[in-house]
Image (cartoon, helix red, strand yellow):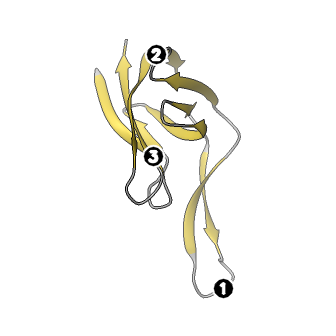
């Protein structure tokens, strides 16, 4: 993986988790039109909502592991991280409002 660019959304109809090659990133609060908090390597687990009822829904839930970084478009849009002894650069490329509500965060990850 040299460079991967994907969009992570914080919206009711989209997952806030994306896999970038060998690493997983999750967008989380706090965030706004110029910044976002990214959880690096979150421990994701599935659980069934309303499993004891007729309508079962499967949702993802974040566990408390991983570490977070804060990316801001104006002053700190790039940060270096290390995962499994590999160095990466994570960059916030853009932030866009979604028409149906929520925000899209375009994230670029580069292997250094």
Q: Image quadrant of residue 109?
A: top left
Q: Are marks 1 and 2 in contact (CB under 8 Å)?
A: no
Q: Nearer the viewer's eye, disc 3 or disc 2? A: 3
Q: Is residue 94 visible?
A: yes
As drawn, the label of residue 15 is none
Instruction: Kindly state the secondary structure of the residue where label 1 is placed.
Output: loop
Sequence order check, earlier mark of 1 and 2: 1
Considering the numbered disc 2 on the image, is that residue within a helix, a strand or a loop?
strand
Q: CA distance from mark 1 to mark 2?
A: 45 Å
Q: Position of residue 42 (x, y in %)?
A: 59, 38
Kindly identify which residue carries mark 3.
Answer: 103
Q: How many marks?
A: 3
Q: Residue at x 66, y 85 (%)?
A: 53
Mark 3 or 1, which is nearer the eye?
3
Image check: 86 left or right of 39?
A: left
Q: Residue at x 46, y 57 (%)?
A: 101
Q: Position of residue 61 (x, y in %)?
A: 62, 54
Whole-angstrom CA distance, mark 3 to mark 1, is: 32 Å
In space, the residues marked 3 and 2 are separated at their CA atoms by 29 Å
Q: Is residue 85 above or below residue 55?
A: above
Q: Nearer the viewer, residue 35 or 4?
A: 35
Residues at badges 3 and 2 in contact (C-beta under 8 Å)? Answer: no
Q: Earlier in the sequence, mark 3 or mark 1?
A: 1
The residue carrying mark 2 is 86
For label 2, the crowd category at 10 Å Cα-Cα, with few meaning under 14, some 14 to 19 and many 20 or more, is few
Residue 60, by quadrant, is bottom right
- Going by the picture, which residue comes out furthest to the bottom? 54
């Amino acid at each position: 993986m040299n460079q991967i660019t994907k969009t992570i959304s914080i919206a009711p109809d989209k997952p806030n988790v994306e896999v970038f090659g060998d690493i997983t990133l999750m967008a989380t609060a706090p965030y706004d039109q110029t910044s976002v908090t990214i959880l690096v390597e979150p421990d994701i687990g599935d659980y069934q909502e309303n499993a004891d009822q007729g309508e079962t829904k499967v949702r993802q839930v974040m566990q408390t592991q991983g570490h977070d970084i804060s990316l801001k478009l104006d002053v700190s849009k790039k940060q270096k991280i290390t995962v499994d002894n590999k160095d990466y650069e994570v960059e916030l490329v853009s932030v866009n409002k979604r028409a149906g509500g929520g925000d899209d965060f375009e994230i670029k990850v580069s292997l250094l």
